[in-house]
Each structure stands twice: as structure tokens, then as C-alpha cells.
Image (cartoon, helix red, strand yellow):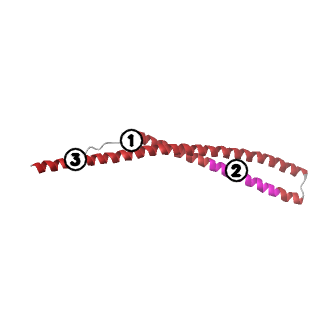
Amino acid sequence: MHKKGFKLQQVLNYRKEVEKVRTLEFADAKREFEHAAERLRREEEHAAHVAHEFVCKQTDGIDAVELQMYANFFRKKQGEINQQRDEVHTLDCKVTEKRETLLHAAKEKKVLETFKDRKMAADVKDQMAKDRHFLDEIAIQKKGR
């Protein structure tokens, strides 16, 4: 029995590799996003802690130099937090883009895998029909003798 190979196997292999690369790119983008989100959370917690400390000092009494120092710190920290939020948003968009790219690559691979499965099933069906026809032919020849 002659076994036919899948003529588009190289294309399928290529699409599998593309999907693997896209998966790694998506994982890297997601990891970057999670690190940036964690930095943002830490920055916000630190600012909240200092704000609480500031409120406690205000109740005890605070002089102008300390007040100016806290004001400068809050201004700087707010700028850093805003910058970190922008970075988190940018990375979130990048993760979404990488997810879409990965889904597209997975769909293209799946299309070829489905085509391969259908082609192989059709080949098996054809071979079974040929075998049946051959056996029928043998049975007819034996009957004729």
C-alpha cells in the first residue's frame, strides 16, 4: 500500500514554529506588563504610606521646611505614578496586540491541521475503496473459475 505524504507538511511545520514564536512573544509582553503593574502598585502603596505619615505629622504639628519637603515629594511621586500608569497602559495595549497576533497564528495553523486531517481521512477512505474493489475483483474471478 503506497502511503501518500501531506504535501503541505512544510507549511504546517512553519506555521507551528510561527505559533511557538508568537506564544513566546505574548508571554514576554505579558510578563513585562505584570512587572510594570506591580511597580505601579508598589509606587502607589508607597505614596499612600507617606501620605498617611504626613497626616500623622500634621496632627502633631509640622514646620514649613517639612511641609515643603512633603509637597515636593508628593509632586514628584505623582509624576512618577502617572508615568508608570502610562507605561502600564502602553504595555497593556502591547499585550492585547500580541494576543491578537497569537490567535491569528493559531488559527492559521489550525486550518492546515484540519485540512491535513481531512486529507488523510479521504486518503484512507480512497484506499479502503480500492481495497474493496480489488477484493471484489478477486472474488468475481474465483467465482468465474
Mark positioned earlier in the residue sequence (2 or 1) = 1
Q: Residues within 10 Å of mark 1 (few under 14, many from 20)?
A: few
Mark positioned earlier in the residue sequence (2 or 3) = 2
Residue topped by disc 1: 9
* Residue type, mark 1 in image: Gln
Alpha carbon separation for disc pair 2 and 1: 46 Å
Q: Residue at x 77, y 56 (%)?
A: 49
Residue topped by disc 2: 40
Task: Return the x and y of residue 133 as percentages of the image width and height.
Answer: 22, 47
Nearer-the-camera pick, 133 or 96: 133
SS at mark 1 in the image? helix
Number of callouts: 3
Left or right relative to 19: residue 67: right
Q: What residue range appears in magenta? A: 33-53
**Of tags 2 and 1, which is closer to the observer?**
1
Mark positioned earlier in the residue sequence (3 or 1) = 1
Q: Main secondary structure of the magenta part?
A: helix
